[in-house]
C-alpha cells in the first residue's frame, strides 16, 4: 500500500511538474513518510520494549517470524511497520537486535533528552515524578508546580514544589520541552494556554478534558476514565455473548 | 460498509444453510455487531464526556453537525459510530442528549457497578484509589493489596491495605470484577495469574508488560512510558519537518 502511494505520487508529480527525477522521488518519499499513522507510531514503543528485553538477554539477531511469535502480532504486520522506516536490514538474515533497538529509539526521539515540568503535585503528579523509568528514557523531571501554597517548597524526589506564579520564568530559564498536566479538568485549559504562550513543545495531558493548542504543539492525552470504561464495555459485551 | 457486510452475510448464510429467513437476519446482524472495532469503542467514552457536559448545561437536543463542531470530528464519523448501535434516533431532529447519554452509558456498561481491587499501593495505586470520579461512574474500589508488610492495615480513603496472602479469599468473598495492577512489571505476570485463577473478569494493567490471559478475561493496558514516547516522537518529527 505504502509503496503504491509513493509510485502514484511519483507519477503525479512527474506528470504535473516534469522536473528532475531524483528530486521527485525525494518528494514522493517525503510524502510517504508523512503518511505514517499514529497507529504505527503507537506500536513502536512496544517494539522497543521487546527489543530491549531481547538485548538484555543477549540475543543478537531475530527474524520477523520469531519476533512475531513473542510479540503476538503477525510477521507481515512487523514487516509493514518497519517498512515505513526503510525496513531496518535484510529479511533473510533476520534483524540485528541492537541496531533495531537503537534505530527505533532514534525514531522515537529517546536518544535525546527532554526536560519536563509537572503541574499538579497530587498523587498522580507524585507518582510520575517518582517514576525513575522515565529518567532512564531521557525524560528529565526538572520542575514541579502546584497552586496549593502549603506544598510550596516541599520536596518530591529532591525536587522542590514551586508556586504557579513561577511557571513562565522557570520554563524560560530551564529550557523545558514538555509540560505534564496532572490537575483537575477545570484548571487544565487555562494552564495549557500559559504553557503554550511560554513556547512549550508538548503537553502530556492527564486532565479529563480535550485541550485546544496551536499546530506545532504536541498533545498526548491519558484519559484514565476512558480506559476504564473501555474495560467495562468489554466485560459487558463478553457477558452478553455468553448469554 | 457495515450494511453490505450484513447483506453479504445474509446471502452467504441463506445459500449455504437455507433455513428460516428471520433467524438468518438475526445471525447476520450478530456478526455485524461483533465487527464493532475497539477503535469505535475507544471513542464512546469521549462522546459520553461531551454529552454529559451538554446535559449539565441543560441542552436537550443536538444535531450531528453541532456535536461534530464541539468535538472536532466529522459529522459523518459521528453518524457512522452511532450506526453501529442502531443510530440513536432521527437525524433530522438531532439527537436527544439525555437519551444518547444514557444509551452510550449502557453500552459502556456504566449503568452497572463494578467492584475493583488495586494491587500495589504505591503513588499510582494511591492516586487511583483516591480518584473519586471512578466511583461516580460505578467503579467501586473495595480492596487494596500490597506485598510490603509495613503498609498492611494503613488506610487509603478509609480502605485498609491488605497483605497479598488474602488476595484469593477477598476476591471470592467480595465478588470482585476488576483487578487493577499498579505494581512493577516483575510482579505483574504472577499476580495476573492469581487473579485469573480466582475468576476475575478483567485486569486494568499499569505494569509495563503484556499479560497473557485466557479468552474471556478482559485486559486494558495503560503503558505510560509508551504514551510519553509517542509524545517524544511527535516532538522530534515536528522539529525535523521545520528543518
Image: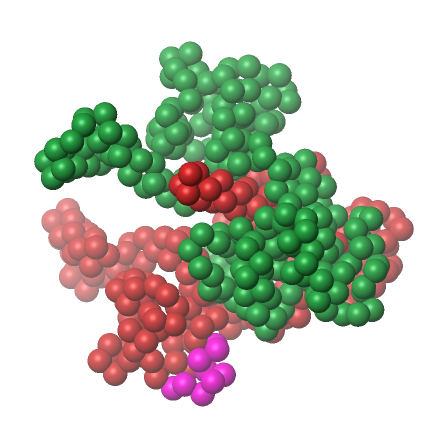
Chain colours: A red, B green
Residue at the location (51% across, 36% down)?
A: B108
**Does residue B241 appear in this view?**
no
* Residue in the foreground of this view, choosing between A82 and A46: A46
**Does residue B26 appear in this view?**
yes
The answer to whether B81 appears left or right of A16 in the picture is: right
Q: Where's residue A243, x and y in %?
A: 42, 38
Q: Is residue A116 above or below residue A239?
A: below
Q: Where's residue B220, x and y in %?
A: 51, 53
Residue at the location (78% across, 59% down)?
A: B161
Q: Where's residue A36, x and y in %?
A: 34, 55
Q: Is residue B56 above or below residue B209?
A: above
Range shown magenta: A52-60
Q: Quadrant of the C terminus of chain B?
A: bottom left
Q: Is residue A56 magenta?
A: yes
* Residue in the foreground of this view, choosing between A95 and B170: B170
Q: Is residue A8 above or below residue A193?
A: below
The answer to whether A155 appears left or right of A237 in the picture is: right
Q: Is residue A150 magenta?
A: no
Extreme-right residue of the structure: A150
The answer to whether A70 appears left or right of B202 in the picture is: left
Q: Where's residue A164, x and y in %?
A: 78, 48
Residue at the location (51% across, 20% down)?
A: B99
The answer to whether B173 appears left or right of B28 in the picture is: right
Residue at the location (39% across, 68% down)?
A: A71
Q: Quadrant of the N terminus of chain B?
A: top left
Question: In which quarter of the view is residue B238 placed?
Answer: bottom left
Amino acid at each position: 500500500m505504502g509503496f503504491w502511494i509513493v509510485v502514484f505520487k511519483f507519477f503525479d508529480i512527474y506528470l504535473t511538474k516534469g522536473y528532475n527525477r531524483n528530486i521527485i522521488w525525494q518528494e514522493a518519499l517525503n510524502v510517504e513518510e508523512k503518511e505514517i499513522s499514529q497507529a504505527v507510531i503507537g506500536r513502536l514503543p512496544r517494539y522497543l520494549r521487546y527489543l530491549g528485553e531481547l538485548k538484555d538477554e543477549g540475543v543478537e539477531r531475530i527474524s520477523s517470524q520469531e519476533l512475531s511469535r513473542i510479540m503476538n502480532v503477525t510477521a507481515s504486520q512487523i514487516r509493514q511497520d518497519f517498512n515505513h522506516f526503510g525496513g531496518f536490514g535484510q529479511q533473510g538474515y533476520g534483524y540485528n537486535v541492537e541496531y533495531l533497538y537503537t534505530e527505533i529509539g532514534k525514531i522515537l526521539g529517546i536518544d535525546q533528552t527532554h526536560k519536563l515540568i509537572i503541574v499538579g503535585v497530587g498523587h498522580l503528579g507524585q507518582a510520575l515524578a517518582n517514576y525513575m523509568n522515565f529518567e532512564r528514557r531521557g525524560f528529565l523531571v526538572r520542575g514541579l508546580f502546584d497552586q496549593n501554597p502549603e506544598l510550596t517548597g516541599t520536596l518530591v524526589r529532591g525536587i522542590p514544589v514551586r508556586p504557579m506564579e513561577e511557571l513562565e520564568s522557570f520554563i524560560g530559564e530551564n529550557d523545558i520541552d514538555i509540560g505534564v498536566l496532572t490537575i483537575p479538568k477545570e484548571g487544565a485549559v487555562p494552564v495549557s494556554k500559559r504553557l503554550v504562550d511560554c513556547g512549550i513543545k508538548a503537553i502530556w495531558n492527564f486532565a479529563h478534558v480535550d485541550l485546544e493548542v496551536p499546530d506545532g504543539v504536541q498533545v498526548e492525552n491519558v484519559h484514565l476514565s476512558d480506559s476504564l470504561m473501555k474495560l467495562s464495555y468489554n466485560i459487558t459485551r463478553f457477558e452478553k455473548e455468553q448469554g
